[in-house]
Amino acid sequence: MNALSDYKGQEPAWCPGCGNFPILETLKTALFELGMESHQFTIVSGIGQAAKLPHYLKCNTFNGLHGRALPPATGMRLVNHEMPVIVTSGDGDCYGEGGNHLIHAIRRNINVTLLVHDNQIYGLTKGQASPTTTEGVVTKTQPFGANASELNPISLAIGLDCSFVARGYAADSVFLKSIIKEAITHKGFALVDILQPCVTFNKLNTYSWYKERVYHLDETYNPYDRAEAFKLAIKPPDKIPTGIIYKNNKLTFEERISILKESPLVKQGFSLKTTLKELDTFY
Amino acid sequence: MRESMDYTILIGGKAGQGLQTIGGVLARLFSRMGYHVFSHQDYMSRIRGGHNFYQLRFSDKEVSSSKKKAHIIVALDLTTIELHKEDLEENGIIIFDAQSVKQTFTGQEYLNVPFDKIAVENGGDKIMSNTAAIGAVLGMLRLEMTLLEEIIHTNLKKKGNDIINKNILTAKAGYQYAINECTQCSFAVSMPGKNGNMLIDTSQAVGLGSIMSGCKFYCGYPMTPSTAVMNYIGSKAQEYSIVVEQTEDEISSINMALGASYGGVRSMTGSSGGGFALMTEGVSLAGMMELPVVITLAQRPGPATGLPTRTEQGDLLFVLHSGHGEFPRVVFAPGNPEQGLYLTNKAFDLAEKYQIPAFIITDQYIADAQWTYESLDTNNLVYNDYRLRSSEGEEAESAYKRYSFSEGAVSPLAVPGDSKRLVVLDSDEHDEDGHMIEDAEMRTKMMQKRLFQKLPLIQQEIEAPFYFGGEKPDIVVTGWGSTYGIIKDAVMSLSKTQNIAMLHFSQIYPLPLYEHFDYLKILSEARITICVENNATGQFAYLMRAETGYKFTHNINHFDGRPFLLESLTGEINECIERL
């Protein structure tokens, strides 16, 4: 790896001022500092503004269907557990359309890093409420205000004993970079919920709104204490903690599959001859 | 010429009574003795109770369908006697345990065998009453006990010698009871064959086919009747190093299988009815990304939940059109386990060679039906690794384009992490690099490559349909998939008096080219052409009309959720002939 510029991909098609820009740059820097070259990792995404990210960062890319990033990421890891897999998703893609997959990816504890660009609104489809939109927010499709209460991804993940749960803020690049680097190197499923202003459609959760609320968890905080982490997760959002909120060191899904112990599936050979004896079992 | 031996045994009872065990052991026994066996199952969507039956036909010649009439009915409950007594062949016998069904029947056709009492007296436990029943059936047929003892040894190995011996004693007692008491038994069983036969069903054959094709990843969500394939592959997963994963839903299944395929191995998923309906967006993704994947669909009657444990060929057109947008695919529908093995292998080969989704469609009837074979041909199985895995130097690798136009229809598919090649796949329309585009020119070029350039190549791979009959038949009976066996048996029996032929399609889409075999000419020149389908609307007939302009003169359609039986299908074909 020569330079940060080696990660440069296609020209982004995001709105000027979009919170996705700092996330993209932060991710590039994190990968660069970790020494991961473009061909050595894979980014899987679904559909949404965040899901376009792998086109803007040179890498192995699986830009699949809306809400369905985690299943192919899981499939990829199961056949090649030496390949680091990062999923870039949004609040609609991951918490809405793909909610079921999130629950079960956490349960499996597949060793995947999930970055959720959480702007609390639908960007690609132009401003409808997302699962994390604050209750009561008026949009074109919710003209009387969003009636459902907002989803709390942090408490959900801690409730499921997710192996790594963190929250970052898009505009806080240096701190976000340290979180992302830890998430990538963490062994197990890592959820990083990244608060991200949407300058076009979200008029509530703006840069200044976040600036007033976001703070760093300090070094005295113990992320291994699940009950404390849960307490933190369900606090009212007048102050928003960022950093690693919860983690544990449980076995990954890949580690629990005995046939993967020797080598990744993709490196295990096949010969038709060895299977011929199977016919004898039918006599 | 002596009439060949051809006996049918029906075992009926409630779910949970062990009728599958009785049927399974008898089927295995007869095939090991060298007889030909065909069995099918009819069960309700419940774990306990209801009415289920297992029907097996055994003969000294090949059999490939079930008959309605049975020679021996093993009734484990009263309902079986009430429902099936009309299905008894002349000189047939119903055996039952009067104490257990709480009613007795007299007459030449009934034989009361106290299964429970025999089990308690010889094995010390009522639980062995099914073993007594198996012994009794052998006694009625005057067959030898030796092989049954062998099977008891194998099946109960884990339970220890005591249990094995008690079961053998019970089987022998049941056997002796029938020898002594069944004075009316007049079955003339021919000498067993020299060598034992294989006994296999199509779910196992599809599972076996995937293992023999180098499938390394299978995922699915449990759904009748597709689960049998997953069970089979799962039972071999450790030995052949295959990851088998039960997903949270079928949407996850197809997407996970595609992720595994992207990772560089052969992958497969499968489902039935509504589960497959959930997969269709992923099918379309495979089409757009040009990712190989094999999908098995075990059909069951719909719409919606339909009849979960019953059979129908109602999803052919759905599979042909599954997934939004236009992209190539192959669709195979094996008519027996032999075709199941071969076509699964071919599906894996074509899926990877052309980077397309390949479908194998079965249905409950053919998935569960067991057939016997002396052996299965494995010389026609292939394994070619079509992936781009070799290294070619950093410069060439950096210039790799996933959807390069330079190689024609099929752009080489590299494996991520294998080299410096970046493998970029997108569900959006994309350029040669795999990045999303919107311009009309690139869109058109990609569609040309992905669809129009591949289609003729794929079509060349499709083999001629199975044909049985003379050069100029008067009557042609056509079918696809699971009706292979029943049509074959029906046409064989009718061919004694009619100039009748059979045409069967197992490689359904694309339809075979005429240059391999001109089936259209055969059909056009016949007087009566009948398309037999286990669905309401005649979906294959529709496909033929759409693709070739040919319209069958007659259609026989069943949509009651039950398979065709030999007597009724022969009767319906005769009706078509007489009507003319």
Image (cartoon, helix red, strand yellow):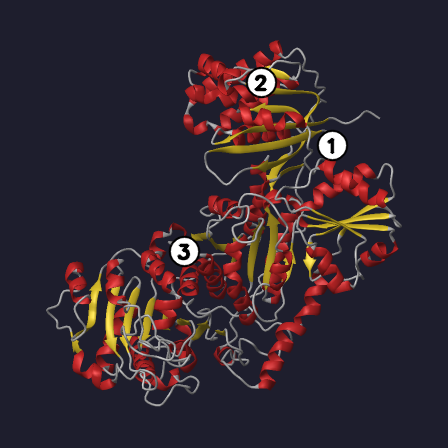
Horizontally, is B23 left or right of A71 in the view? Answer: right
Taking depth in this image into account, of B397 and B128 the one nearest to the observer is B128
Q: Which label belongs to residue A181?
A: none
**Residue matched to label 2:** B136
Q: In terms of secondary structure, where does tag 2 sit?
A: helix
Asked whether the residues under marks 2 and 3 belong to the same chain, the reply is yes
Horizontally, is B540 left or right of B133 in the view? Answer: right
Question: Marks 3 and 1: in contact by CB < 8 Å?
Answer: no
Q: Chain of mark 2?
A: B
Q: Earlier in the sequence, mark 1 or mark 3?
A: 1
Q: In terms of secondary structure, where does tag 3 sit?
A: loop
User: Mark 3 belongs to which amino acid?
Assistant: Glu
Q: Quadrant of the N terminus of chain A?
A: bottom left
- Number of other residues with Cα within 10 Å of mark 1, as a class: few under 14, some 14 to 19, many 20 or more: few
Label 2 vs label 1, nearer the camera: 2
Give the percent coordinates (x, y) of residue B358.
Answer: 60, 60
Label 1 vs label 3, nearer the camera: 3
Q: Quadrant of the C terminus of chain A?
A: top right
Q: Residue furthest bottom?
A: A16
Asked whether the residues under marks 1 and 3 belong to the same chain, the reply is yes
Horizontally, is B236 left or right of B449 in the view? Answer: left
Cα separation, mark 1 vs mark 3, equals: 46 Å
Q: In terms of secondary structure, where does tag 1 sit?
A: loop
**Residue matched to label 3:** B248
